Amino acid sequence: MALLEVSNLSITLKTHRGRAQAVRDVSFTLERGATLGLIGESGCGKSLTALALMGLLPGHAQIDGSIQLDGKELLDLNERQLCALRGNRMAMVFQEPMSALNPVHSIGRQVAEPLRLHQGLSRAQARARATELLERVGIAQASQRLDEYPHQFSGGQRQRIMIAMALACGPDLLVADEPTTALDVTVQQRILDLLQELVAEHSMALVLISHDLGVIAQNVEQLLVMYGGTVVESGMTETVFAQRAHPYTRGLFAARPQLHGSSCTDRLPTIAGAVPELVDLPAGCPFAGRCSYTQSNCFIERPQPRTLHQPSVAAPASLASWRQPHRVRCLYEQALKAGAQA
């Protein structure tokens, strides 16, 4: 049985212009010790998907589908039952550390809280363990800084404190939403290495959300490309990066700054048009109108995922159950062939 199974996840939000489907029919499976990346521009549904996994969607959100952790349906649990899982079996590193940390409690108390709540450690034991966790994420003189408050730390240090909190109880599932945004390159690599160590040591499953394609390429085995609340392409990271079948995926890669092969005065390619409001998304393909291959059917007919390639049978046995087929949502073979020829 897979650790995490998400099936047909859809999230509808109330807006001042009416109801908007912010996430549409997202499905994926994550085994223990596996890593999954979510990429896409802001507003594509990445963070909402993560919040849905943790049961932290806003009260006005309507959620449909299924989210199962070890076969237990999370959407059927009440808040008390979810609290028993959060910080214990599943944890999340939030995108903005200053708003996620409590400004009126010391960082030592905040890191120690899940240890006392879920593992029953004494105050002294939890404090000692909190010191170890802070040291592991690179907080210097951790034992002397336990009684300091979030405003006394830099943005990068606050991010590391949040990671220490999330890792405190050794969760089975860690959801990391842009965990290295506020960190310099050296510290960023240290944190990413730490996450990989924990995945290997404890068979922890990792869902990593990032705008940085380099971070995704180096740290996750599976990948979901999202646009307009829909997974437009998915598969093993190496396959998706190499083939880039969906026109949106190709647009993302084309917009990356290149260190070699272009003049500093060259303009970066851009995707035509602008991201529509959620309530204005077409009933069919969310990328319709911005895609150069758009046909009239694209606005009204929702593409179903089609499998382009099955995973290699030559994959190591330890990875065989993790390897996902390469799938893409697009109506027209011509658009997909353009990716194969690029």
Image (spheres, rainbow, N blue to C red):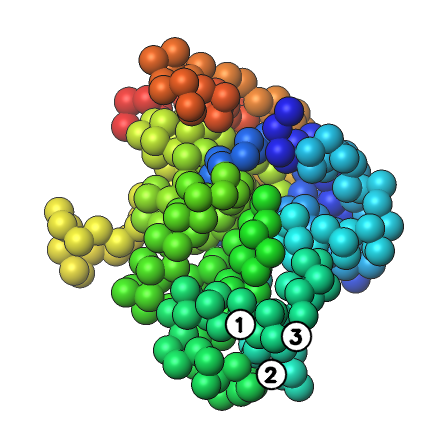
Q: Position of residue 323 (x, y in %)?
A: 45, 23
Q: CA distance from mark 2 to mark 1?
A: 15 Å
Depicted 152 relative to depicted 101: above or below: below
Task: Give the SS element for disc 1.
Answer: helix
Residue 106's disc is 2
Task: Give the SS element for disc 2.
Answer: loop
Q: CA distance from mark 3 to mark 2?
A: 14 Å
Residue 231: quadrant of the picture: top right
Residue 235's disc is none
Q: CA distance from mark 1 to mark 3?
A: 9 Å
Q: Position of residue 249 (x, y in %)?
A: 42, 37
Residue 84: quadrant of the picture: bottom right
Q: Earlier in the sequence, mark 3 or mark 2?
A: 2
- Rendered-image quadrant of the N terminus: top right
What residue is disc 3 on? Answer: 123
Please state if 231 lies on the left or on the right of 139 as rendered.
Answer: right
Residue at point 40% right, 47% down? 196
Residue at point 49% right, 48% down? 208
Q: Residues within 10 Å of mark 2 (few under 14, many from 20)?
A: some
Amino acid type, mark 2 = Ser
Residue at point 57% right, 60% down? 168
Q: Residues within 10 Å of mark 3 (few under 14, many from 20)?
A: some
What residue is disc 1 on? Answer: 128
Q: Nearer the viewer, mark 3 or mark 2?
A: 3
Amino acid type, mark 1 = Ala
Q: Earlier in the sequence, mark 2 or mark 1?
A: 2
Q: Position of residue 246 (x, y in %)?
A: 44, 30
